[in-house]
Amino acid sequence: MSADDFAFNLITDRPIDVQALIGRVAAPECGGLAIFIGMVRNHSKGRTVRHLEYEAYPEMALKKMNEIALEIKSKWPEVSKIAMIHRTGKLAIGEIAVAIAVTTPHRAEAFTACRYAIDTLKSTAPIWKKEVFEDGDVWASAHA
């Protein structure tokens, strides 16, 4: 089985369309749809954030996303579809940086698989962010 059979993964510099994401994973046999949306917040580590800048190694990030999707399918075979999208570029406060959607016949597996997807993506994908504060900036992994 290939991740292409049930997964949609994307690294993009365009705003994430959550309705389109839902459309990618909707399945008539599934009653459970879990979505995680990560947004840029206005503070980090006690400092005021102006914006974030994300960079990625797209080919490797997409490879990692496909590996995560295959891992999820092996752990939770009832997962029907999964979609993971991560932004790159300059993002303002309130913009969506990452979105993940998972469909399953029932909600419990959708929640569990979605959480696993975001936790694993953030801990393994070659995606980095620069936090731009009022008083300077710092590069960090997107895992923070």
Image: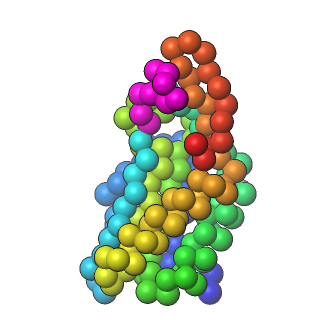
Residue 125 left/right relative to 88 = right
**Going 52% across and 65% down the picture, which residue do you hit?**
117
Image quarter hosting the N terminus: bottom right
Q: Does residue 29 belong to the magenta stretch?
A: no
Q: Nearer the viewer, residue 20 or 83?
A: 83
75 and 80: which one is in front?
75
Q: Up-down: is 43 above or below 115? A: above
State the image coordinates of residue 143 (x, y, percent, origin top left).
60, 47
Name which quarter of the figure residue 101 lies in: bottom left
**48 in magenta:** yes
The magenta span reads 40-50
Compared with 44, 69 (above or below) is: below
Depth check, front residue: 99 or 58: 99
Could you tell whether 43 is left or right of 70 in the image?
A: left
Q: Residue at x 72, y 57 (%)?
A: 60
The percent coordinates of residue 131 (x first, y second) are: 57, 28
**Where is residue 142 shown, x and y percent of the image?**
60, 44
Q: Position of residue 99 (x, y in %)?
A: 44, 54
Instruction: Note whether residue 45 is visible.
Output: yes
Extreme top residue here? 135
Which residue corresponds to the image point at 58% horizontal and 42% vertical from the top-left? 144
